Amino acid sequence: MPGLADYREVWVLDCEFRAPAGERPYPVCLVGREYHSGRTVSLFRDELRRRLTAPFDTGPDTLVIAYFASAEMGVFRALDWAMPRNVVCLFAEHRAETNGLKLAFGNSLLDAAAMRSLPAMAAATKEANRRLVMDQQSWSAAEAKTILDYCAADVELTTRLLERMAPAIDWPRALLRGRYMAAVACMEWVGVPLDAELHRRLAMRWDDIKAQLVAGVDADFGVYEGVTFKMDRFKAFLAQSGIPWPNYPSGQLVLDDDTFREQARRYPQIYPLRQLRATLSGLRLTGLAVGRDSRNRCLLSPFATVTGRNAPSNSKYIYGPARWMRNLIRPPEGYGIAYLDWQSQEIAIAAGLSGDERLIAGVRAGDPYMAFARDSGLAPPDATKATHGPLRERVKVVCLGVLYGMQSATLAAVLGIAQCEAAELLQRHRRTYPVFWWWLEATKSVAFSRNRLASVFGWPVRVTAHTKPTQLANFPMQANGAECRRLAAAAATESGIEVCGPIHDAFLIGAPIERLDEDIARMVRIMRRAGEAVAGFPINVEVVEARWPYRLNEGKGLEMFNKVVNYADYREYREY
């Protein structure tokens, strides 16, 4: 069978573990079967914990197969076993095979089996066995046998699924995706360090804090009644302030968070209101998954989106709720942390893949937005962010909007300008970067003609009659941005860097203070090389760091954070 015959041993694995919210996985059992020989291993809790190494070779001649392999790799990490050199995750390959299609099935092991007409246990039986693992801390001999039999059944099903899927698997790229699943396990193991005591105090007083937040912020806007946002009051505020606002065809205001975000860029005076709305509507302060070691951990949900990005829970992951909550991130004593962000990653990828030399030059100069303003004649040759800040914010919307097919009507609504002016801005972009625009249109045409589009390392999307051209326009930037992150995460975790967690186009890392500078330098090199592997040239990386006792301040959310802390009356808090 293609791919499998290249390895001396091929182990199909399934593991079970307990993982209370925010905690590291506690291994319960491992069952595996070697594909060529049929040899099996079956280890329950105490047998697992006594082993210093995996029950089989994990070197270059061995391939490990699992469904949602970050779970199995999390058990390896918890047991301090060497990670397998070669991993293929059938969940990731199922997602790759079906991405973009409208299916009657989901993405669980049972769904993947049902889609391929493979018989499997009932979903209710699987859930009962899963609850037996998760809801107890000790098990009788009979219960242990039930759990091991359940694991063995999943190994059998995964083996049959492997045989069905193997002919269509792109093995070299599957191995790359498997490396990332191992990296995910490492990132979930490390977790994001939080000021857990402050988080606990805020959670205890959250209902009172919300009421005080509304009273404090809304004093400048007058758009709330109690804690309820009132549309008519907001319309009156906009009219009085002279702020144009996007409308639906029905005349109703567009009030989603993306619109508020764009409007806050255009009109900074409404940023506190946008933060307040995000805080009240999107935040469940008690939902953050925080372990006993004051680390935030949750399932990172790799390959969950069409573009192959992660999709962790917005309520459980610190980077999901309102931005001010990121100020809860704080290194433990003796440690430092660093936030490393690819600069203008999506534009850099568009520039590199299109080969537009003028766009590439703007990216490499460090500010593609001002480069467009200058190159298009909107700003003089010596213009900078300092001299033309408002113009830069306007053209930034243009530069990012064209990446996902923004049209003049939407651009006009976002910027609060006439549609003819918006159309002229888009035309300027076309005239300034004609090679990019040719590539963008060609990409969509090829995708529709081949019914398929893929990233540089093979993450595919199927193109159907339901696929929107705007989705295809943005797919290369988003999917290849995900490739950058997967490459960097794998290289960083394999080199021993403590990656606390991924963000959209960034990472948070941690290290003992005496090693922080070295690890930051290594991470920057890794991220730049990952950018080069995807875009064809190194993508610059911006670094913000904090060392104990200071916290990693999130500038845009700091004002709201300080208000929340003040309303909590946390006198022991110091504004580090």
Image (cartoon, rainbow, N blue to C red):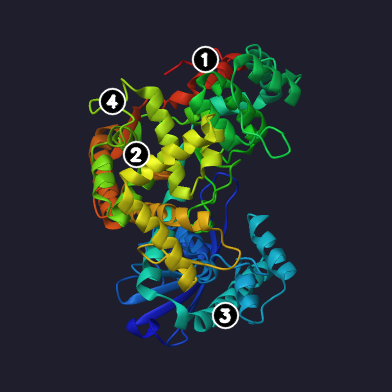
Q: Quadrant of the C terminus?
A: top left
The structure residue drawn at horizontal position 31% and vertical position 43%, both measured from the top left corner, is 432
Q: What residue type is labelled 3?
A: Glu
Q: Residue 177 carries which label?
A: none
> Type of residue at label 4?
Thr
What is the crowding at mark 3: few (fewer than 14 residues within 10 Å), some, or many (at least 20)? some
**Residue type beneath disc 2:** Leu
Q: Can residue 520 be seen in this view?
A: yes
Which badge, 2 or 4, is on the more N-terminal residue? Answer: 2
Sequence-wise first label, 1 or 2:
2
Helix, strand or loop at label 3? It is: helix
Q: From the image, tell me which residue sits under label 4.
A: 384
**Sequence-wise, which precedes: disc 3 or disc 1?**
3
User: Can you say which quadrant of the picture contains the N terminus?
Assistant: bottom left
Residue 224 position in % (x across, y down): 72, 20
Residues at marks 4 and 1, CA–CA distance in whole angstroms: 42 Å
SS at badge 1: loop
| Residue at mark 3 | 156
- Of badges 4 and 3, nearer the viewer stands 4
Task: Give left or right: position of 358 versus 430.
Answer: left
Q: Considering only order in the chain, which callout, 3 or 4, is on the residue closer to the N terminus?
A: 3
The residue indicated by pointer 1 is 572
Which of the numbered marks, if any, corresponds to residue 340?
2
- What kind of element bears circle 2? strand
Q: Nearer the viewer, mark 3 or mark 2?
A: 2
Alpha-carbon span between mark 4 and mark 3: 62 Å
How far apart are the two marked residues, 2 and 4, measured between alpha carbons? 24 Å
Q: Residue at 55% x, 70% y: name it.
A: 98
Q: Residue furthest front?
A: 420
